[in-house]
Image (cartoon, rainbow, N blue to C red):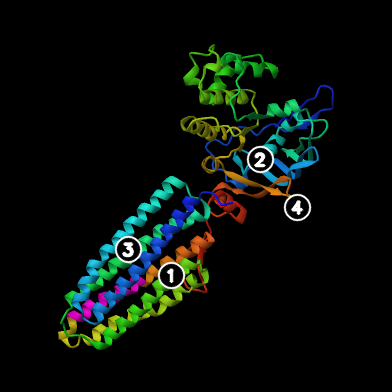
Amino acid sequence: MEARLQYHEQLRRVEAHIQAMGDAAQGLFSKAINAVVRDDAGLAERVIAGDDVIDEYYNRSEERIMRLLALQAPVAGDLRLLTALLHINFHLERIGDMAVNLAKIGKLAHDLPRSQTVATQLEEMGGIALRMIGAAMDSFARRDVDLARSLPDMDDPLDKLNKGMLQEVLRIAEDKRMLEWGIRMHVVSRQIERVGDHAVDIAEQVAFVVTGEVGIFSGPDNPVNVKLP
Amino acid sequence: MTPTRLRSSDRSTVTMPNPIPDTTDGLRITPRQREVIFQTRDLTVSYGERPAVRDVNLDIHAHEITALIGPSGCGKSTLIRTFNRMNDLIPTARVQGSVLYRGTDLYAHDVDPVEVRRRIGMVFQKPNPFPKSIRENIAFGLKVNGISDDIDDRVEAALKGAALWDEVKGDLEKSALAMSGGQQQRLCIARAIAVAPDVILMDEPCSALDPIATARIEDLMQQLKTRFTIVIVTHNMQQAARVSDRTAFLTAEVDEDGDARCGVLVEYTQTKTLFTTPADPRTEAYITGRFG
């Protein structure tokens, strides 16, 4: 017969809270991409304001996790889950911050001459990053290590597009009127690439929860795993 | 090292090695390097026809604290009592398989259980000082073991070893029964270490103590393990996690008829592994409270 029912219910609740935060962070980031790509200053304002919701999720999650650590002395799978939740909480909060960064850049770049090619490329990058966040959180919900291990693979095209962005910006900057917008979009590209990295880090936490291994994903065929001592 | 002997006055003599000397202070010895003190092989202990714990195979390592945890009825107290033949005192108890102490069968017919219990002391759940003075509580055990010289020095050393000296040095003639529960338990530990044992067995030593007294005993255990090997039975999983180097998890299995329970060893590994990444789902279920 299961004991410590309240404790286990609290664990379920804090995980559900983090999943809801994941949805919120994903939604905010999606809006931020749209604000930049569509040059929508009003949407950018709403993204900036929306980060308060992510911060509230973050603070509540941390408070709940700390309380469980202090009062329930979790061990084994419960301990791994709570430490992973602490990490995932941090990564989602950072994704929220990056959505705000995108929105602020979008406001600064408002009405500047722009390149549709670059905007389309950023939209593609944003789509990849969003799918990565979704896959990472889904792998967490289902404790799906195989899906988690696929995240570095998903990250590769994002890295390539980000690296290619500099050349694209230099190309459009030959028209000096596009220089400022181009430079700002290069920063946007870098921010989107970092969101992909956060998704990979979340996936690493999934592998830790399930296997107890501290994983550094260097690629799906060559994960570097360090066994806990 | 010259071996010492477990003498039995009316039986043959068995040669046993001396306890290892106190040379580990300040050294960083990894668990894998430590000498094995006890080895149980296919150990089954029964009361009457009914096994209380069966087929236990585990090694206890020198200068470590080994914790035995598990639900009520899993046989952990039965198991710890095999390490100094305390089960001999129960007429229906029967031991099958083997318990090797430093390579010698503890249950060989010519091993003297009294000498075994001097080498392998025990501290119980409830402090059990003699109704005598603090000093006499320790001196008595020394005298029973034929030690009559330097009694005062030995009493002082034992009390210091049990982290009790500073609290009682002015009251050695005071009745032990006037001490607090925590002090009484440390006096029992002092009594155990006064006769220079090799191993100290502790059967839920803190279950009757408050958190402060418990913390003092736990601190003391860390000091004692540099000189002795310690095996502890505890119901408090956090205590096992805090103090021990290795943990054995036992559980009670119900037989096919559903009317008898018997303890089995489920998992035995380093404590930090057992409490972070246990290998057996039964361990995970028990330590996280999902036992079912």
Residue underneath mark 4: B256
Dot 3, crowdedness within 10 Å: few (<14), some or many (≥20)?
many
Per the model, the C-alpha gap separating discs 1 and 4 is 45 Å
Q: Residue at x 66, y 14 (%)?
A: B148
Determine which residue is flagged by label 2. Answer: B76
For disc 2, the chain is B
Mark with earlier residue (1, 3): 3
Q: Name the mark on residue A136.
A: 1
Q: Secondary structure at mark 4?
A: loop
Task: Using the image, determine if residue A47 lies above or below residue B166.
Answer: below
> Along the line of sight, which residue is nearer the eye, A52 or B108?
A52
Q: Is residue B220 magenta?
A: no
The kind of residue tagged 3 is: Glu
Q: Give the residue at mark 3.
A: A93
Between the residue at mark 3 and the residue at mark 4, the CA separation in whole angstroms equals 53 Å
Q: Which mark is residue A70?
A: none
